[in-house]
Amino acid sequence: MTLSLNVQEIQWPGNEFKKPRGYIVPTHLKVVTVAEKPFTWIREVEDRSLCNEDEIPCPRMNRTSGEQDMYCCRGYCMDLLNALATELNFTYTLYQVEDGLYGSFDYVNGSEKKIWTGMVGDLVYERADMVVAPLTINPERSQAIEFSKPFKYQGITILEKKHPKSSTLASFLQPFQKTLWILVMVSVHVVALALYLLDRFSPFGRYKLPSSDATEEDALNLSSAIWFAWGVLLNSGIGEGTPRSFSARVLGMVWAGFAMIVVASYTANLAAFLVLDRPETSLTGINDARLRNPMDNFKYATVKGSSVDMYFRRQVELSNMYRTMEGKNYDSAEEAIAAVKSDGLSAFIWDSSRLEYEAAQDCNLVTAGEQFGRSGYGIGLQKLSLWADQVTLALLGMHESGYMEELDNRWILQGSETCEKNEKFPATLGLKNMAGVFILVGAGIVGGVGLIIIEIIYKKHQTRKQRRLELARHAADKWRGAVEVRNVFIT
């Protein structure tokens, strides 16, 4: 018996003879994330309806009140979540992890019982079906949950504040080292003393010439010699007090050549230091001596319970650094980055993606050294989840299509061109660069006023002394005249 079915003659519900389109009922998943720029930006709102089109409602449980605070989330991971939901045909409810942690296997309140915390804990204890966040794939977490293939590869790096090469007030002193400045100052006065002695004792000096009408005041005294040495060094005009003897003039020419070389070298180095001066990093990388052998005034840390914390815990050669950071680690990356900006923390060790983003947004921050501990961010799923292979295939397709590169350009690399452009062009000199020179001029004016006050006081003292001598001489002459008159009268 043969049966045949003519689909065209079937009357479907609604008195329709056309076969309706079939739909696959999507699976609904609970997705957990964590606030971490630029992967997840959060904005607190009063109601979920206030979220924009590019934002996803993501409430977070408030431990104090026991109620949910409403937030709107956007960023790299939110765009990735929407793309996965479209590709794999699932719906989702997004929320933020209550304790704000990524996930580590820790003891409970000092007891011997250990549990998983953070987003990993939500997967392990089936409070969530999926983690879409910058969750690093590592061996400890892989034993408790399933990971997809990485959607982004990254490493660990160090964030610190840029350090200027010298203080701005002393910028004009940068071209020479302190030792060279001291030697130049000493040389000026040594040459001045030598010029004075040569011109003073030379038979051809100004004061020694037999046919000259010059007096001792016209000779090259020590004050004039010092003025001459400084005038040659600073390339200023010298109207009087020049050496006359041949030996002193030879020394003067040598000194002029020395001054020319010193001034030219100073000018060239000053242009290089001031115009091209850029802040520099103080750390060379993970093997820097200040990290391996920490000092009291150098504080560095990471985020407690994070994959970076686990990495340092696993590495035997980094055990000293782990013990140093253990009691100083921060609860979140936001707090640590704020501490670096406020100079409360010397260095912050964290995922390279986040730190490179922060350095791109703030040109006063810089990542130091090369990346280490390379790993990847993966989508977290419950153990033995059937979604693991599907998510991996979807991520591979996004990599091949260039979608992941678009997310990098949109969220992580934005703003980096500004700092790079500033690094390529020389800085315009401002008051902060040349403030030390103005302070030096001010100090010269104050010193001149102080010296003229001393000169006035000294001159008044000399005038009083001279007046007393004249009065005494006048009295003596008067007394001598009286005595002579008396002797004549007696005679």
Image (cartoon, rainbow, N blue to C red):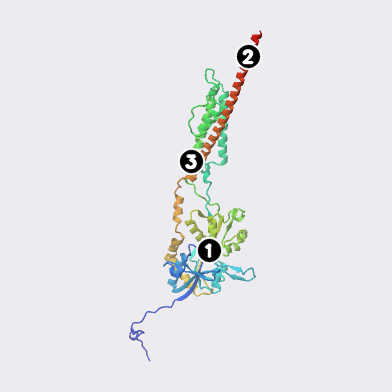
Q: Amino acid at mark 1?
A: Ser
Q: Secondary structure at mark 3?
A: helix
Q: Quadrant of the C terminus?
A: top right
Disc 3 residue type (three-letter) = Ala
Relative to 48, is 463 above or below? above
Furthest toward the bottom, the residue is: 1
* Residue lying furthest top: 491
Mark 2 packing: few (<14 Cα in 10 Å), some, or many (20+)?
Answer: few
Residue where numbered disc 3 is placed: 268
Depicted 231 relative to depicted 28: above or below: above
Between label 2 and label 1, give the one nearer the viewer. 2
Q: Which residue corresponds to mark 1?
A: 375
**So how many labels did they put on this image?**
3
Spatial CA distance of label 3 from label 1 is 47 Å
Amino acid type of the residue that numbered disc 2 sits on in the rendered structure:
Ala
Distance from label 2 to label 1 (Cα)? 114 Å
Q: Determine the CA span between mark 3 and mark 2.
A: 77 Å
The numbered mark, 3 or 1, whose residue comes first in the sequence reads 3
Dot 3, crowdedness within 10 Å: few (<14), some or many (≥20)?
A: few
User: Tag 2, which secondary structure?
Assistant: helix
Tag 1 or tag 2, which sits nearer the N-term?
Answer: 1
Residue 222 in which image quadrant: top right
User: Is 390 drawn above or below residue 238 in the view shown?
Assistant: below
Could you tell which of marks 3 and 2 lies nearer the N-terminus? 3
The image's mark for residue 126 is none
On residue 482, which mark appears? Answer: 2
| Residue 334 can be seen in this image | yes
Q: Find residue 94 and report its horizontal and vertical position in percent.
A: 48, 71
Q: Residue at x 53, y 24 (%)?
A: 246
Percent across and percent down for residue 391 are: 47, 71
